[in-house]
């Protein structure tokens, strides 16, 4: 029985890729609901463009794109605002039966956030350690969606794929929002230097630092999130354990 479970785990990711690329699932939904998917793309598109073009600031991005610089706050909504947009869109779209587009925004929004960690760190610096608790609370909607998977999708490869991708999005969101805010919270509580001074010296995501010993514990919330995902999706515990190990190895490298 144990050997069968191990063999099953080995092929889970293959099933994910196969099902995600199946024309009868994702592509058919896009063809049947083009307006919904265009709106979903509009939600993550500006943030993706900002990230992929490696802009240095919202103002410079607007200037480089030939847009009024006074409207950089709109771009900020589509980048830093993914802190709210990704989990809440996932939750409300799932409640209306639009699980695929909700997953798309959750993954896209989390990817935007993880590519721009300094934005979250700056928010954390302004609001202090309570911002860490706020980020943890914002992850709850996606966990609730994952917990209610049986009401949203029928059993089979499609639900397995959806659960795996949503769990991945939650882990990315954790790295993007909760880890940097935890780092700033640790600075506030345990470090002698000012948070702003340390943030100018330390990568809030990658690698260890000697600047403040407590910062090495900023990855601890990932273990808590692994436990939360395992509660919401017990079958996915092995998958999430493997994903979290890969994420941590990548961050430490």
Image (cartoon, rainbow, N blue to C red):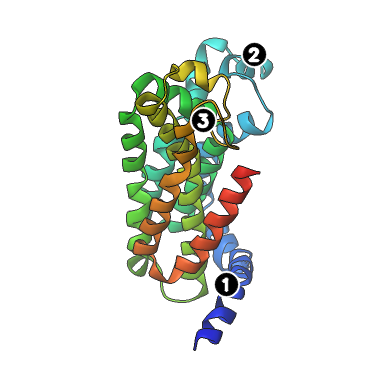
Residue displayed at 37% across by 45% down:
139
From this viewpoint, is residue 36 visible?
Answer: no
For marks 3 and 2, the one nearer the N-term is 2
Residue 103: percent from the left, percent from the top?
Answer: 47, 53
Q: How many numbered circles does the render carry?
A: 3
The residue singled out by tag 2 in the image is 63
Q: Nearer the viewer, mark 2 or mark 1?
A: 1
Answer with left or right where residue 79 lies relative to residue 223. Answer: right
For marks 3 and 1, the one nearer the N-term is 1
- Which residue appears farthest toward the bottom when viewing the image? 1
Answer with left or right where residue 9 lies relative to residue 190. Answer: right
The residue tagged with tag 3: helix, strand or loop? helix
The residue singled out by tag 1 in the image is 12
The residue tagged with tag 1: helix, strand or loop? helix
The residue singled out by tag 3 in the image is 79
Please say if the residues under marks 2 and 1 sit with CB atoms less than 8 Å apart: no
Q: Is 191 situated above or below 228?
A: above
Q: Quadrant of the C terminus?
A: top right
Residue displayed at 35% across by 24% down:
128
10 Å crowding of disc 2: few (<14), some (14-19), many (20+): some
């Amino acid at each position: 029985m144990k050997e069968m479970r191990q063999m099953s785990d080995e092929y889970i990711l293959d099933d994910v890729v196969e099902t995600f690329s199946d024309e009868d699932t994702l592509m058919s939904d896009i063809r049947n609901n083009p307006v919904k998917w265009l709106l979903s793309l509009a939600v993550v598109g500006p943030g993706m463009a900002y990230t992929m073009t490696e802009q240095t600031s919202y103002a410079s991005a607007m200037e480089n794109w030939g847009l009024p610089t006074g409207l950089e706050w709109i771009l900020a909504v589509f980048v830093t605002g993914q802190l709210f947009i990704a989990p809440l869109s996932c939750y409300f779209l799932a409640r209306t039966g639009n699980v695929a587009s909700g997953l798309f925004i959750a993954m896209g929004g989390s990817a935007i956030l993880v590519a721009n960690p300094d934005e979250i760190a700056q928010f954390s610096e302004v609001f202090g350690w309570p911002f860490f608790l706020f980020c943890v609370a914002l992850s709850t909607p996606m966990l609730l969606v994952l917990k209610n998977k049986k009401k949203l999708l029928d059993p089979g490869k499609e639900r397995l794929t959806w659960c795996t991708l949503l769990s991945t999005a939650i882990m990315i969101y954790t790295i993007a929002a909760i880890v940097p805010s935890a780092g700033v919270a640790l600075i506030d509580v345990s470090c002698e230097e000012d948070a702003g001074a340390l943030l100018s010296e330390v990568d809030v995501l990658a690698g260890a630092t000697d600047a403040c010993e407590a910062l090495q514990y900023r990855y601890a919330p990932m273990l808590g999130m692994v436990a939360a995902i395992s509660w919401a999706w017990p079958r996915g515990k092995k998958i999430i354990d493997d994903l979290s190990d890969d994420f941590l190895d990548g961050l430490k490298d």
